[in-house]
Image (spheres, rainbow, N blue to C red):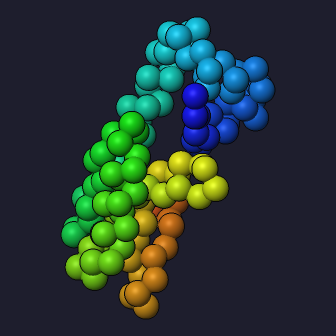
Amino acid sequence: MTTTLSKSKYLAGCQCPKRLWLQSFSPELAAEQDASVAARMEVGTEIGRHAHALFPGGVFVDEEAWQHGKAVARTQALLADPAVSAIFEAAFVHAGVRIRVDMLEHQPDGRWGLPEVKSVLLNWIQVGEL
């Protein structure tokens, strides 16, 4: 069986190597998600919604986790499109590690930046833009 390393699995492994092994090879043994984890995920979803509003012309890569290959292909196509101002949930693979980033921002010089979305939103809130 082939398994891949994701950010969540990496963080689980940093916390406890046994947890990483169980998530990778025996996920059916995982405990039910508690209310605090669900609440954090909902906050993340809400932050994502606000970020989309701040970047008109941005595109959301909505392929599910099990469609990572399709998400990578779609990300590559969007990177080549000069009309795209931002890519949300951009997908990559490097050395067997699956990567999904919150957002890539098309810079004026043509390069792509990887901003911290929460920081971007906090700056907008502080100047009263939201």
Residue 6 lies in quadrant: top right
Residue at the front extreme, as displayed: 1
The quadrant of the picture occupied by the C terminus is bottom left
Residue at x-position 43% and y-position 91%: 109
Residue at x-position 67% and y-position 36%: 11
- Residue 4 image position (x, y, % from top left): 58, 39
Q: Is residue 64 left or right of residue 111?
A: left
Q: Is residue 72 left or right of residue 55?
A: right
Residue 106 lies in quadrant: bottom left
Rendered position, 94 above or below 82: above
Q: Nearer the viewer, residue 51 or 84?
A: 84
- Residue 113 image position (x, y, % from top left): 49, 73
Residue at x-position 47% and y-position 30%: 40
Q: Nearer the viewer, residue 116 or 78?
A: 78
- Residue 16 image position (x, y, % from top left): 77, 25
The quadrant of the picture occupied by the N terminus is top right
Rendered position, 114 above or below 25: below
Rendered position, 35 above or below 119: above
Residue at the bottom extreme, as displayed: 109
Is there any visible trace of residue 97 in the rendered image?
Answer: yes
Q: How many marks?
A: 0
- Residue 2 image position (x, y, % from top left): 58, 34
Is there any visible trace of residue 50 in the rendered image?
Answer: no
Q: Is residue 127 left or right of residue 77?
A: right
Residue at x-position 40% and y-position 39%: 65
